[in-house]
Amino acid sequence: MTNKVPFPELNSEGVITLTVIQGEVPSPREDTQMAQIVALCSLMTDCWAFDPKARPNIVHCFDELKWVPSTAPLGEKRSGSKVSSVSLLLQMGETHLSQHRHEQAISLFQQALSLARVTDDEANAAFALRNIGRAYLLQTRYNQTEEWFTQAQEVYARLGNQLGRADVLGDLGNLYYYQSKYTKAEDSYTRAQEIFAQFGNHYGLVRTLRGLGEVYGAQSKYAQSEESFNLAQEISANLGNDRGRAHALRGVGDVYRLQSKFRQADESYTQAQAIYARLGDDHGQANTLEGLGKVYRLQSKYIQAEESLTRALEIYVRIDRDNYQADALRKLGRIYHLQSKYTQAEASFTAAQEIFTRLRHRRGQADTLRSVGHMRQDRGQNVEAAAHFAEALTLYEQLGMTEDAEDVLRTLALVLPEETSSATSPDTSFPSTSFSQ
């Protein structure tokens, strides 16, 4: 992997053997390219533990490595091998998807789908359909998302592929959760959970338990939420799945935060943060920092909240996660707003909206418009506030986010009651207000 033999500075086999016996091993982090993949470096070091019992098992190694994007090696193609071409297109699409290049991923998945249909390869066709849906979900194009997931479900059902069906049910649960359709999300996750349990698929089971934990938390069913996350954490621990444990701990932290149990939330987030740091999971660390930022905001500890969100933002910028970067900017804008730092708030909201607009991330656009609307409302700028709320309302309705749309409509009625008292939707004659104003 580094094009070097271990201990290249030592020229004696005896010295090398003695060095290893003494517990010294090569440091992969010293290699410039390897050091960029912290989790892989940590895993390699763990595998070199002198005590065999301390070394990770193959399941743990697989779980740690499967997230790393990869492409097929260069080499000779087998002429006429359409099956390998479909697999290659799917692999390339997944690589683009993992790096948030959604349009490129969709194009590759659609090419794979077309070729799979020509060759009657229904298994890969279903996989392509599902991944197209996942790409649309990441773009918050929710109507298209459901269409593609439904097609994938139909193919998996026709093939009798129950685990494939369970995967898509989990995806549908994610979609409904993002749309705040919690009853439908709970039903999808529960059905997926039953299939995963039936087939003993523990990794799928952990994913659906975390999904259920999120849904229960959003509905203030805190006992059920905590139970789901704790069970996910227990199963992950038994599997040696540290990343799964960290995700579940972060979920428990969210549950405590929603109940204003700030000390317990802080402890859970801190434990998750330590695991993410060890794995080199920058994304996980940034997400946890956002959770801590919310804990501090709810306690009116705005300086600490600003610090946590700024650190999260720096990570998102470094790892090139534009949508998360935009959301962190929006949350920073809220912190500035709460401190009456309106210039900084305006700048953060504007930067967030520019990214969301470029990404065509309509939910992010709606959430930012809503945040700016609240800031305008607090400053007594009711007409401008109403314009932002009206734009947010339109986007929420387009996304099928009924609860958010209804909440914004109620806020509109408070901001300009004379404009909304006789209407079921805001007056579209509200002036359009740009963030630069």
Image (spheres, helix red, strand yellow):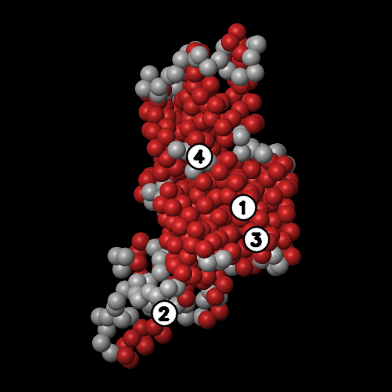
Which is nearer the N-term, disc 1 or disc 2?
2
Which is nearer the N-term, disc 4 or disc 2?
2
Q: Position of residue 246 (x, y in %)?
A: 56, 56
Residue extending farthest to the front is 118
For disc 2, the neighbor class at 10 Å (few under 14, some 14 to 19, many from 20) is few
Which is nearer the N-term, disc 1 or disc 4?
1
Q: Are marks 3 and 4 in contact (CB under 8 Å)?
A: no
Mark 3 lies on residue: 156
Q: Residue 278, can we see it?
A: no
Mark 4 vs mark 2, CA separation in Å: 41 Å
Mark 3 vs mark 2, CA separation in Å: 50 Å
Mark 2 lies on residue: 23
Q: Residue at x 65, y 18 (%)?
A: 424
Quadrant of residue 209 within the rendered picture = bottom right
Residue 293 is labelled as 4
For disc 1, the neighbor class at 10 Å (few under 14, some 14 to 19, many from 20) is some
What's under tag 3, amino acid-wise? Tyr
Foreground residue among 7 and 330 = 330
Mark 1 lies on residue: 151
Mark 1 vs mark 4, CA separation in Å: 40 Å
